[in-house]
Structure formats: structure tokens, C-alpha cells
Image (tube, rainbow, N blue to C red):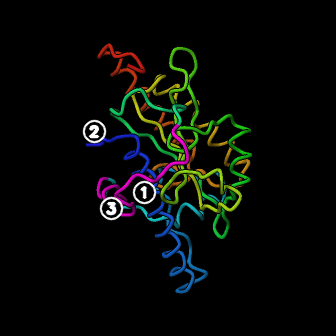
Amino acid sequence: MLSNLSDAAVIRIVIGAAFLCIILYILLSGKRRSRNPSSPAVRIDPEVRADSDAEREYADALPRPQDEADFREQAKLHFEPETPKLRATSRIGVRRTDAYEKLVMLYLAAKSGHSISGAELVLATEKVGLVYGHNNIYHRLAEGVNANEPIFSMANVVQPGYFDLDQIDTLQTPGVSFFMTLPGPVTAVQAWDSMLPIAERMAQLLDAVLLDSDRNALGRQRILHIKEDLRAFDREKERQIIKPGR
């Protein structure tokens, strides 16, 4: 089903999922504090490790949908039927094809009680080398023959998901989402090795928390699992004699 979605639909799913997660987190955390301020955090799944007490507390409070497919379908309800009006049409960061087989996501969330300002965000994107382009979001671009095609992209978790540079000074967001669609201009492992360090660096620059697609703190064990899954994806593409970007 996901393979038939357009760029705009992919971004809507990504932003909708993140936006719904933030809203539920705010509601649930407020109820939790009012019932029992001293109650312990919910247990983290054993396969996921938080690298600090602050990340563990934040990640445990985030809701987890029982079914990811249902969650994504529900997220679509948060969007207007029309594609948001963009400030300009840019070819920077346009994917070669709308078809894809796998979607890999990470979330960068402001710590509880805080937000990320537009000025901070723009400065961070400049430091890590992200480029503003297609759909008015940020991209990490491939080089060589696939230049201008995105290895991965970064969008706002608040709908409609794009960044309006004309009003960026007024932006306050609870977080952003990083996502890549596969196959892409490079192998899955190469794309991950590009996205992860940039997401980690932005987490440092913005004093934010890096989460996986299930809203768990992104620990070392989870990183290893994701990378092994991407290696398997690349091996399958090699068996099918499909080159990245084709």
C-alpha cells in the first residue's frame, strides 16, 4: 500500500504520525502527573536502551500504538484534503520516482516543557549540511550522477509539515522527523550511515531527544537492529540485481 504513495502522501504520513504522538504524549503525561506525580515511569522495552535518565523518562512517557498500520491510517485524518500551498516549486530534493518499498524514520523531539525555535533549527541545519528544497522541507542530497536527489529528508512534526522561511523566526515546534525511502540514490546502509550522524548531531545542537519510529529512545541495541535490517534489504536488492537509485 505504501509503495503507491506520492512524495506529498509520504510526508503527510510522517508528519501525521509524529503530530499525533506529540498530542497524545501531552495529554497522557498531564493525566499521569495529576494522578500520581511520584509514580515511576513506564518500563522501557528490554531491546531498547536509553542513553541517559532524561531520555529514558521522556521516551517511557510517549504512547505506543498497538498496530503501526492503524496508527498511520489514523494519522491521515489530521490533514487537509489539499496539498499545502508551497512558497515556491523547487527541484532540489525531488525523488526520481514515487515508488518505494521501505520507509525508515527517526524523530527528534524537544524535551518535555520545551520547544525548538525556527532560528535554532535553521542554524542547526546549516551546520549539518541539510538543504532547503522540494516540498519546502530539508534534504540531505546525494552526489555524483544522483545529485539533487534526497538521501533522506527532514520535516516538521506539526502539520502541514513544511517550513515557511518567510515566517521561520516565529516557528516553535515540539520536534522534527527524519525519513528516507528505499530504494534510493545510495544503498540502504549508506543512507542510514548518512542520516543517523546528522540526526545525532542535531540532537546535540538543539538539546533534544532522538527517538526511533516507535517513539523509543534510540539506544545502541536498536541502532544495531535497524542497520542489520537495512543490510538484509541491500542483500535482497543485490539478489534482484537492482541497483540503488534505479
Quick one: label 2 or label 3, which is nearer the N terminus? 2
Q: Identify the image quadrant of residue 56.
A: bottom right
| Circle 2 or circle 1, nearest the eye | 2
Magenta region: which residues?
69-89
Residue 231 in the figure: left or right of residue 144: left
Of the 4 image quadrants, the one containing the N terminus is top left
- Label 1 to label 3, Cα distance in Å? 8 Å
Q: Residues within 10 Å of mark 2 (few under 14, many from 20)?
A: few
Q: Where is residue 185 in the image (x, y as percent from the top left)?
A: 47, 23
Can you tell which of label 2 and label 3 is closer to the viewer? 2
Query: Label 2 vs label 1: CA separation?
Result: 18 Å
Identify the element where label 1 is drawn.
helix
Which residue shows up at 60% across the image and 64% down it? Answer: 57
Q: Where is residue 182 in the image (x, y as percent from the top left)?
A: 40, 31
Q: Residue 4: which disc?
A: 2
Percent position of residue 172, x then y: 65, 62
Q: Is residue 79 magenta?
A: yes
Closer to the camera, 58 or 108?
A: 108
Residue at which label 1 appears: 17
